């Protein structure tokens, strides 16, 4: 199809579009003129309108534009000046390095003095004319020329001088000269930061020139970093302070690393260096509140490293980490805020420290203690996971005769001291850390002390019992703990809100004219809940380790499983919420292990063990009828336990049928409760059916109807009862599954059966189903029965049809097919209406 317009109509559309584009261009030009006027208009008391004029309004006449300043526009000018200064610098370097030798000493001196003097004097005149950016570029060139002058002086006049020493002296002279130059021309921003950069070199390079070692170099770097700190504290230009901060960070970091290394090789030298560094950093932290936390944390780490380095040679090797941890904990006590009392100098000193400094010191000490705790974790991991690394059979007794591993006992000391310190802090996070460390201490204690098998197992059971008891009754854990602030309620007095600033006023928030809506705050978690869950998690983690350890000895296995079953059942009874549910499920699994252990001790075969395992789902079904809060998870866990019972009985089909039948009995008993009726009845039906099929397979029954009729008959009965209650229920829902369960497998068997009884019986049954469907207007019966009847009849008549077609002349089948097509074509409309009526009738059936 051709959808193009006639030329005249298309011309009209093109003209309209061009007119619209012209109007839009005029609007954009007016907007551009207004923006230019706002940008380049002279300053006046009357501010420009806050909003642009309407797109169609005529712009007012713009006044004369003032001459552009030297720094306008800044971006383009700065790029040009930077490129120019860079090119001049490259030219000066090339001249100094390449063309210097072609001139005499007089010419060299004249050229250097003239060019450097001109480059340093030009910014004075440029600043008077207001050309600040140009003055900056020329001043930068002058500073580079001064460096080249120093290099040229070394090459010509002092070639024998040591490179490091000469560089140190030259850097000091340049730093002083640039400081004086930048102070005289205060409008220049480059000289003073460059002077700070040059000032980083004299002392470290002077020490290297004098042959000083790492210690002397570190002291020189520390003095330079202290000078940088003084510049940060007592200078005003931001560029100078930022440059000094970078230098102090680099040199101070090198000093601290050197001090840490010296504390391991030369404790007294390293301690002196670290303590002086810590004092200077702490002073800077007190004077700079914005950096108080970070600087005081660095100072605290340096102090801990110094103290630990002094104490380390006096203690055995196993006590090295505990010494550092104790120093860190002492630092935490210094940084912790506490009320000052008379006669307590430490408390008064701590009270005078700013909050940021105390926080940084506490963080440093906590970090050292945290590293110590990490060092002490391997015994915890071995105590928890070691029993699971089994290489021998169960109840062999081999692991009971030897310890799991050997670790230094100081690891337990680190855990104990850290837990005690955290327990003394009345905060929830500290109490949680203390609880976790106490659990880790009890877990690592047998490994670190090399306890016997019985003591190790008893300690693990004790740890589990204490943790589960704390989960049920977490009250003692919260004793002395500060409660969270209560949420504001209807009766809580609220402070009067401050008057909001006017929109657009300084300090007014964005969108201050919009009504503010209070943000909902999440309620704070109860300390008892948090600590209870933490203790509960520790107890549950200890359970598998205790069970794995108990598998070495038969008596220990029964004692441990029994004790755990009592503990978990107690939590399930006394606990609340999700902890109760988890404990109940864990108790079911523990009971399962106990049943398996009894079967193994009695020498039961697998199929007898399967029957014994059915005691667990039977018990959970009985408990579920009484314990409503945990009924569903307990019964679900019991049902899961039944699955390995079926798997164990699979080796003996007769016992598998019995096991499935007993499972069906348990499910049927569960279905007696109203809330389990649907699930229990269906589960029981499935299990009984599977038991029947397994029994038929044991009897070597090959007839498919023996397997399908036990499904069809109950399904049809259930469908009939449902249709009686609900006349609107579909026949496919009521009768479809039951009929399909027998008709379809029997149809497949009939097509492969060479005998006549099965197809005849199937045809009679399908005919009866079809007639019933037509009589009672049931769609499922009519469709399924008719389809099976047709396919069964086709299977039976197919040999005779083939034989008859083979006896007819070759031309007769095509002729008959042609006549059939002609008859259908002649009455096509009538046949179509008949098919539609048949479809509607079938669709109206239920």
Image (cartoon, rainbow, N blue to C red):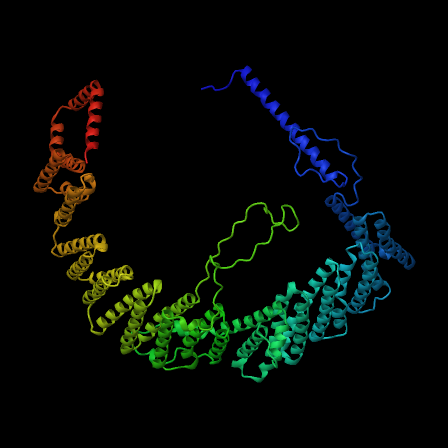
Picture quarter containing residue 438? Answer: bottom left
Left or right relative to 504: residue 495: left
Where residue 557 sits, quadrant-wise, is bottom left
Q: Quadrant where the N terminus lies? A: top left
Residue sitting nearer the eye, 718 or 222: 718
Q: Position of residue 322 (x, y in %)?
A: 53, 78
- Asked whether residue 148 is in view, the answer is no
| Residue 829 image-quadrant placement | top left
Residue 312 visible somewhere in the drawing: yes
Residue 129's x, y, as percent?
Answer: 85, 47
Task: Give percent across and percent down for residue 145.
Answer: 82, 56
| Rendered view: 781 above or below 658 | above
Question: What percent of the width, then of the height, locates residue 2?
Answer: 47, 19
Which residue is nearer to you in this view: 360 or 663? 360
Compared to residue 784, the image places residue 124 above or below, namely: below
In this rendering, position of residue 820 left or right of residue 279: left
Does 736 appear above or below 140?
Answer: above
In the displayed structure, does residue 20 sit left or right of residue 235?
A: left
Q: Is residue 734 or residue 174 the one in the foreground?
A: 734
Vertical position of residue 345 compared to residue 251: above or below? below
Q: Residue furthest left?
A: 757
Please tell me how many numbered marks the rendered image carries: 0
Q: Specify the quadrant that holds the C terminus.
A: top left
| Residue lying at 79% horizontally and 66% vertically, measured from the top left | 167
């Amino acid at each position: 199809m051709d959808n193009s317009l006639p030329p005249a109509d298309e011309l009209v559309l093109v003209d309209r579009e061009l007119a619209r584009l012209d109007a839009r261009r005029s609007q954009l030009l007016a907007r551009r003129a207004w923006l230019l006027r706002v940008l380049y208009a002279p300053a006046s008391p009357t501010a420009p309108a806050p909003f642009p004029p309407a797109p169609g309004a005529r712009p007012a006449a713009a006044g004369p534009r003032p001459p552009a300043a030297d720094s306008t526009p800044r971006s383009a000018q700065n790029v040009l000046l930077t490129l120019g200064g860079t090119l001049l610098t490259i030219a000066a370097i090339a001249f100094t390095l390449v063309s210097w030798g072609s001139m005499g000493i007089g010419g060299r001196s004249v050229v250097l003095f003239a060019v450097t003097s001109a480059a340093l004097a030009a910014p004075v005149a440029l600043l008077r004319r207001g050309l600040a950016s140009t003055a900056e570029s020329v001043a930068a060139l002058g500073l580079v020329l001064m460096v080249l002058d120093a290099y040229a002086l070394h090459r010509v006049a002092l070639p024998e001088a040591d490179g490091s020493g000469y560089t140190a002296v030259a850097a000091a002279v340049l730093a002083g000269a640039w400081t004086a130059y930048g102070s005289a021309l205060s409008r220049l921003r480059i000289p003073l930061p460059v002077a700070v950069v040059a000032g980083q070199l004299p002392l470290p390079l002077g020490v290297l020139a004098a042959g000083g070692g790492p210690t002397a170099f570190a002291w020189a770097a520390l003095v330079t970093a202290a000078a940088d700190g003084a510049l940060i504290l007592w200078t005003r230009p931001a560029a100078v302070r930022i440059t000094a901060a970078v230098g102090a960070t680099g040199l101070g970091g090198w000093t601290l690393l050197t001090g840490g290394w010296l504390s391991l090789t030369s404790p007294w030298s390293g301690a002196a260096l670290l303590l002086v560094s810590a004092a200077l950093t702490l002073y800077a932290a007190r004077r700079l509140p914005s950096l108080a936390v970070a600087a005081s944390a660095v100072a605290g780490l340096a102090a801990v490293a110094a103290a630990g380095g002094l104490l380390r040679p006096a203690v055995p090797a196993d006590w090295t980490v505990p010494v550092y941890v104790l120093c860190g904990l002492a630092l935490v006590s210094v940084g912790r805020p506490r009320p000052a009392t008379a006669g307590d100098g430490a408390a008064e000193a701590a009270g005078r420290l700013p909050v940021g400094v105390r926080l940084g010191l506490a963080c440093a000490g906590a970090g050292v203690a945290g590293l110590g705790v990490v060092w002490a974790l391997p015994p915890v991991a071995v105590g928890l996971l070691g029993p699971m690394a089994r290489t021998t059979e169960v109840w062999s007794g081999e692991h009971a005769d030897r310890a799991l591993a050997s670790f230094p006992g100081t690891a337990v000391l680190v855990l104990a001291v850290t837990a005690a310190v955290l327990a003394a802090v009345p905060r929830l996070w500290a109490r949680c850390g203390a609880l976790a460390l106490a659990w880790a201490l009890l877990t690592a204690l047998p490994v670190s002390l090399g306890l016997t098998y019985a003591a190790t197992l008893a300690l693990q059971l004790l740890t589990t019992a204490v943790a589960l008891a704390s989960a049920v009754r977490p009250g003692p854990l919260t004793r002395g703990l500060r409660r969270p602030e209560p949420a504001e309620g209807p009766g809580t007095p609220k402070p009067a809100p401050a008057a909001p600033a006017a929109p657009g006023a300084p300090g007014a928030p964005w969108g201050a004219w919009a009504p503010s809506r209070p943000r909902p705050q999440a309620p704070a978690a109860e300390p008892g809940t948090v600590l209870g869950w933490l203790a509960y998690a520790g107890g549950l983690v200890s359970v598998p380790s205790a069970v794995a350890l108990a598998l070495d000895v038969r008596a220990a296995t029964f004692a441990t499983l029994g004790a755990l079953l009592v503990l978990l059942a107690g939590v399930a009874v006394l606990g609340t919420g999700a902890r109760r549910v988890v404990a109940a499920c864990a108790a079911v699994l523990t009971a399962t292990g106990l049943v398996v252990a009894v079967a193994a001790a009695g020498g039961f075969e697998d199929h007898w063990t399967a029957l014994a395992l059915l005691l667990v789902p039977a018990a959970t079904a009985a408990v579920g009828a009484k314990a409503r809060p945990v009924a569903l998870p307990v019964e679900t866990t019991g049902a899961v336990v039944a699955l390995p019972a079926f798997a164990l009985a699979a080796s003996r089909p007769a016992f598998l049928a019995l096991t499935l039948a007993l499972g069906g009995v348990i499910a049927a008993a569960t279905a007696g409760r109203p809330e389990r009726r649907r699930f229990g009845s269906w589960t029981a039906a499935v299990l009984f059916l599977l038991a029947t099929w397994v029994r038929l397979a044991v009897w070597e029954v090959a007839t498919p109807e023996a397997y399908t009729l036990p499904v069809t008959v109950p399904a049809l009965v259930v469908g009939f009862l449902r249709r009686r209650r609900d006349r609107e229920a579909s026949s496919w829902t009521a009768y479809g599954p039951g009929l399909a369960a027998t008709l379809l497998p029997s149809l497949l068997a009939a097509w492969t059966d060479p005998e006549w009884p099965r197809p005849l019986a199937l045809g009679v049954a399908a005919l009866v189903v079809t007639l019933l469907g037509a009589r009672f207007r049931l769609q499922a019966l009519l469709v399924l029965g008719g389809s099976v009847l047709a396919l069964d009849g086709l299977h039976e008549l197919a040999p005779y049809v083939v034989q008859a077609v083979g006896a007819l002349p070759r031309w007769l089948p095509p002729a008959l097919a042609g006549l059939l097509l002609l008859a259908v074509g002649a009455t096509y409309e009538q046949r179509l209406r008949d098919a539609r009526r048949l479809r509607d009738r079938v669709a109206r059936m239920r």
